[in-house]
Amino acid sequence: MADPTNTDASGQAGRLLLGVYRGLSALAAPFVPALLQRRARAGREDAARLGERQGEPALQRPSGPVVWVHAASVGESLSILPLVGRIRAERPGTFVLVTTGTPASAALIAQRLPSGAAHQYVPVDLPGAVHRFLAHWKPSLALWVESEIWPNLLTEARKRGVPVVIVNGRMSPRSFRRWMRLRPLALLLLGTIARVFAQSADDAERFRALGARRVDALANLKAGAELLPVAAAALTDTQRRIGGRPCWVAASTHDGEEIEAIRVHVQLRTRYPGLLTIIAPRHTVRGIAVEQLARGVGLDTALRSAGQMIGPATECYIADTMGELGLWYRLCPVAFLGGSLVPHGGHNPLEAARLGCAVVVGPHTGNFATLTRELEQNGALRRVAAAGELSAAVAAELGGARRPQVAAGAEALAAAGAAAAEAVLAEVAIHLPSGV
């Protein structure tokens, strides 16, 4: 792999910034174990597997080529499952290592990886951790999903001749502005990347402006991801418990959004007798706090993590468990997607739309701008400018009459995502020896 460094002022500035980053990260290394322990106590790390976050392998490396696929969180993990399956089916001699950074994604991915693939946690971006990780796994190719750009990982991958391909590349306007402030470093780092498959033309242009060389705009790979899973027994039982009651879900909510969902319930419960509001906070550790909000306004509330089930009198159900959005999307005709009333950037709206949910989002959808726009154009999504408009948007969809139309519009986008996966597979073939 060619070294993109050069002797001009920008190149010198980039090398200086990289040196500062690597030096500071090395100095931080002694403090990282305590930080990881603190995060584990808060439920943000897997306490039993903290060694993996420091680059210590928990599995033996198999013989033959290894393709390393990194997906940061739950949504990204789901999006790459079909790709992992295809690599294993078409190249049975190739082992696929999937890394993620969150316990939620690890719990989900471990249940669904095919034979010949395994999960480890990605190492924190410290020189020692990165060295241990790459020295053990020796990947032939790295596929990084979306916008994970870590200076030490990229630098060490280049030194070892590991091609890095960004898949489903996303560069939000906010991230772009941050990198532009460090443009010499961005030019140095992104210049090492073998190829970028961006999820939209806008993302592709931002990657090019930051120094990426081979950039193609494809459809969003997440659009072709498998449907969110559901436990059949849980679906049957919960359908029975809800019966014919009107219901909706506020999914992946963040602080400040749950109270708005509760206000929607209070405003609509007279108009829709028996209304059930399901709130699935993005961070499940907040379940009790959300329960207290609902009880504070007098709602009969149940907490799923406590083993409480939906009863005839339940008005607000706090679904504070991991990996169950597929259940709530199948049951509810309307889904408000959190992270969009507050400036977080939103969450994946296609997951809900493909299961027939009419999707409602707030103004902050930068993380999924293209998908949101396309679903809106297909009539599968409503956008509200402020929290005060949420009740009317939910009320307009509660009948569920548009569920087949919504799902059909979403499946058209899913087909484009499947085509994007084919392009990525062709790139994989370029970097791996034939016959493995």
Image: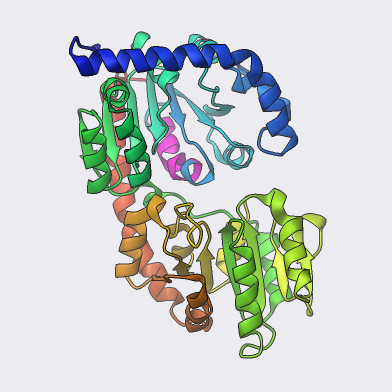
- In the image, residue 76 above or below residue 273: above
Q: Dividing the image into 4 quarters, which one contains the N terminus? A: top left
Q: Name the residue rendered at 60%, 53% in the picture.
A: 282
Q: Main secondary structure of the magenta part?
A: helix
| Position of residue 321 measured from the top left corner of the image (x, y, whole percent) | 69, 53
Image label count: 0
Q: In the visual, does 65 lie left or right of 52?
A: left
Instruction: Please say if 336 is above or below 17.
Output: below
Is residue 88 magenta-colored?
yes
Can residue 360 be seen here? The reply is: yes
Q: Name the quarter where the C terminus is drawn.
A: top left
Q: In the rendered view, would you say 304 is above or below 70?
A: below
Residue 358's spot in the image, x, y percent?
46, 72
Foreground of the two, 50 or 236:
50
Write the residue at 20% across / 11% down.
6
Is residue 237 in view? no
Say which quarter of the image contains residue 3.
top left
**Is residue 52 toward the left or the right of residue 184 in the image?**
right
What stretch of residues is rendered in magenta?
77-89
Q: Position of residue 288 (x, y in %)?
A: 76, 57
Residue for point 52% across, 27% down: 116
Compared with residue 205, is residue 325 higher up or lower down, i.e. above or below?
Answer: below
Q: Is residue 424 left or right of residue 126?
A: left
Image spot of residue 328 (x, y percent): 60, 64
